[in-house]
Image: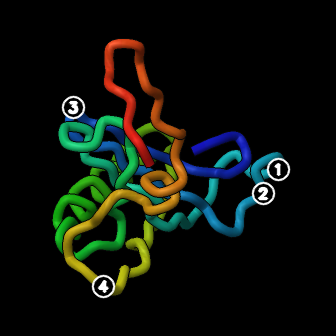
Amino acid sequence: MSESEVGRGIRTSRWKYYAVAEDAHPWDDPAAPAYREQALYDLDHDPYELVNLAGYGSHAGVAAGLRDRLVRRILEAEGTTAVIEPARARAGREQAMPDPEVRLNGPEPVRYGHQPRTTS
């Protein structure tokens, strides 16, 4: 989440979950009646948050539990009932892989002085 969107999130020792109000204006709307799941990260296995698990059937149960907790927390903190729509289902493999943009276009590897030179 950032200041360029209206969103709400919750974090546990293992999971980071947040939802964004797609139709809300970040400067004019402090909150919204409806949100859509934006991200779900497994912080134990992905501490750098490279694999967004939102929308994968393999993690739908985890997302549903965190969604319910976040709706209750919004009610406690803001006094309003919000609706959080599940993330759009992702087609393809059931197991998420690291974002190819991060994996394939990341920083160039660095050779340290004690490492042997490689020939390309």
Q: Residue at x 20, y 43 (%)?
A: 45
Disc nearer the start of the sequence (3/4): 3
Q: Residue at x 19, y 59 (%)?
A: 62
Q: Is residue 29 left or right of residue 58?
A: right
The residue type indicated by label 1 comes to Asp
Task: List the single residue furthest toward the top.
Answer: 113
The residue type indicated by label 4 comes to Gly
Disc nearer the start of the sequence (2/4): 2
Residue annotated with mark 1:
28
Disc nearer the start of the sequence (1/4): 1
Mark pair 2, 4: CA separation: 32 Å
The location of residue 1, given as percent across then percent down, is: 57, 45
The residue type indicated by label 2 comes to His
Are the residues flagged by discs 2 and 4 in contact, CB closer than 8 Å?
no
Q: Residue at x 65, y 51 (%)?
A: 6
The circle on residue 110 is: none
Q: Residue at x 68, y 51 (%)?
A: 5
Mark pair 1, 3: CA separation: 32 Å
Q: Is residue 13 above or below residue 91?
A: above
The location of residue 117, given as percent across then percent down, is: 38, 29
The residue type indicated by label 3 comes to Ser
Mark pair 3, 4: CA separation: 29 Å
Residue annotated with mark 4:
92
Circle 2 SS class: loop
Mark pair 1, 4: CA separation: 38 Å
Residue annotated with mark 2:
25
Task: List the single residue furthest toward the right.
Answer: 28
- Whether residue 81 appears in this view of the structure is no
- Whether residue 15 appears in this view of the structure is yes
